[in-house]
Amino acid sequence: MTMSPDFAMERESTKGMVLSWQIRSAWVRTVGHVVRKDINQRLEKGTTRSGVEVPSSGREVMQYLYW
């Protein structure tokens, strides 16, 4: 059975998607780790660098950072 060109191309793009997903998730993990470390340090001090109070719960912190 011969593979149709469409199928071969689809497989390549899937491979590319998986690769980019792996890269992205690795990047997110790294950034997430750095951010978490930063958050933990800030929480210990109780304020951000700008002197704003940091909410104590993790979810609030994430919203505080990203929304």
Image (spheres, rainbow, N blue to C red):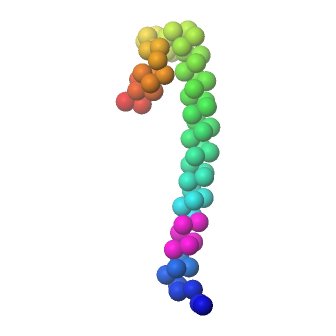
Magenta span has 14?
Answer: yes
Query: Considering the image in quadrants, where does the C terminus appear?
Result: top left
Residue positioned 51% across, 74% down in the render: 10
| Prevailing secondary structure class for the magenta stretch in the rendered image | helix
Looking at the rendered image, the quarter that the N terminus falls into is bottom right
In this view, the residue farthest toward the front is 1
Residue toward you, 1 or 16: 1
Which image quadrant for residue 45?
top right
Q: Is residue 20 above or below residue 49?
A: below
Query: Which residue is farthest left?
Result: 67
Q: Position of residue 47 (x, y in %)?
A: 49, 11
Task: Tell me where residue 50 appears, x and y as whole percent.
Answer: 46, 14
Q: Which segment did they paint magenta? A: 10-15
Q: How many marks?
A: 0
Residue 58 visible to the viewer? yes
Picture layout, residue 8 above or below residue 21: below
Q: Is residue 44 left or right of residue 48?
A: right
Position of 49 compared to 1: left or right? left
Q: Name the residue located 58 percent from the left edge and 46 percent from the top edge.
A: 25
> Which corner quadrant of the image does residue 41 belong to?
top right
Residue 63 location (% of width, % of height): 40, 26
Q: Is residue 26 above or below residue 34?
A: below
User: Is residue 65 in sight in this rendering?
Assistant: no
Question: Magenta segment: does it hold 20?
Answer: no
At 62% from the left and 37% from the top, the residue drawn is 30
